[in-house]
Image: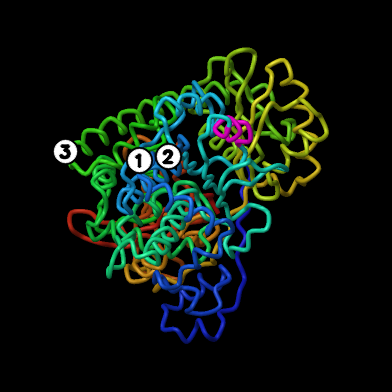
Amino acid sequence: MSVLIRRRQAAVPPALAAGGLHPVLARVYAQRGIQGPDELARGLDRLLPADALKGMETATALLAEVIAQGQRILVVGDFDCDGATSSALAVRALRLLGAAEVDYLVPNRFEYGYGLTPEIVAVAADRRPDLIVTVDNGISSLDGVAAANARGIRVLVTDHHLPGAELPAAAAMVNPNQPGDRFPSKHLAGVGVIFYVMLALRAHLRAAGAFGTGTGPNLATLLDLVALGTVADVVTLDHNNRILVAQGLARIRAGQCCPGIAALISVAKRRQGDLAATDLGFALGPRLNAAGRLEDMSLGIECLLTDDPARADELAQRLDGLNQERRHIETAMKDEALASLEALSLEETADLPVGLCLFEPHWHQGVIGILASRIKDRLHRPVIVFAAAGDGQIKGSARSVPGLHIRDALDAVAAAHPGLLSKFGGHAMAAGLSLAEDDLPRFREAFDAEVRRHLSADDLHHQLLSDGDLAADELDLAVAEALRAGGPWGQGFAEPLFDGVFTLLGQRIVGERHLKLRLQPPAGGQALDAIAFNTTDENWPATVAQVRLAYRLDVNEYNGRRSAQLLVEHIEPC
């Protein structure tokens, strides 16, 4: 796959230049559209107001009524990290706010599928809830909400996914993406939505005198969960989400997080005191997700709910074991997928469909999303990976590339071919769907045709957006620390990436699959270390004198010593 490195271009606005920032950091911010220091503020007082969310008044009145009457509340979540953190936050917050009976239920991916289905409502009914609160799902659960209504169970939907043409007949609904909602940010994760609902509920109860002369519980104690779910769900880190994540990270670094998150940090071998947003996404999130992919997300939710450190450690160890098992399954599936593509000339991708669909009946339903992401990264085109779901049905997990809104593409296919898709839903970059196995050939053709309508040949090149080069005197620890502290970085607010030509002084393989480099910066300067993770370049030509890199400048900590190092994203000989 060819790689194009393109440099961002943006002048540093005067207000940003005058803000006392390191010039490199000011340049990076400018290239992400930041105009002044106000957009970098991280105080909770800068959060968007909760009452701007449509349906909030109805939702909080409903919750307050249920709490006042001592009725049962059942939280129904999703089986990913956002769903787990949303469920744990809802249970913790409702208990803090005076709910006497709160429980949770998360559908098993393999038995019930996603969302509030009529089948999961039947299971929920055994617990005799008076109110079901959905978190990170529900906006498309028309039949499930109807089934709950038929049983006399009211439903409060809290979700962030894009709605369909029809909305469920819920008693209340909060979703920044529902029609008519004027909340300025449309990028809240599911955990962000339920956090806002709890903030509004506290304000409602406070106004009603529920806390006497006090202000009520400190819900900022739950921001560790908000940060984890927001980063792990790969939602856009707009200003509002950056505040939520930065505040949650600050609490985690200060040791003020729930025992479950502390235990996950420990098993992931990360340093809690300087945890970064990337650690939430690449170390903690996958371990929680492993429960939903291979077993039952209840294991992950229990880890986030327990206040017993010993119990949290036990559950985190089990989650870590599941994550290792997930990796083995994923590797085997990836090898099979790549082998099946060899006949289509993997390295000469002109013969591949632009919208790629892969299916093997024995593939694991819980891992197809990760496999789709891996193949998408390698081939840089939209990929859907399917697994058998029983009764002649297959389930697919889709991942997209810039230029194609994958949920809209599925919507277009469904509109052009009525009855082809059993169901679908998702976001711009990720989606899920179901269809009959016999219809897969027809869907493959329709999906590829729809993708070709939107993507050109240039869109199929992997592009790295660089913040330019760094001078030799900028490749130091001070700049690396400034960049690390300048986040949180993530989706839509990309971690700084630079490019440049370096003299190659030495190279070796470490840890069996990582390429360690010793480099000389351009125009002199002090030599420094670099590492390219998960590479197979053991036979890198010894005659190469210079290499062009796309890299991140990071802090390396070893034996108590801190130094600057380059994390290599792309390497090619000059």
Dot 2 amino acid type: Val
Q: Is residue 167 magenta?
A: no
Q: Position of residue 190 (x, y in %)?
A: 49, 48
User: What is the secondary structure assignment of the residue under circle 1?
Assistant: strand
What residue lies at 28% left-to-right and 66% top-to-bottom?
Answer: 212
Task: Write down the quadrant of residue 273 in the picture.
Answer: bottom left
**Relative vertical location of residue 511 with respect to residue 503 in this rendering, above or below:** above
Q: Which residues are magenta?
A: 141-149
Q: Residue under circle 2?
A: 75
415 to 221, vertically: above or below: above
Q: Is residue 446 left or right of residue 535?
A: right
216 and 409: which is toward the camera: 216
Front residue of 17/460: it is 17
Q: Tell me which numbered mark, 3 or 1, is placed earlier along the sequence.
A: 1
Looking at the image, residue 58 sits to the left or right of residue 208; the answer is right
Quadrant including the N terminus: top right
Count the marks: how many? 3
Residue assigned mark 3:
310
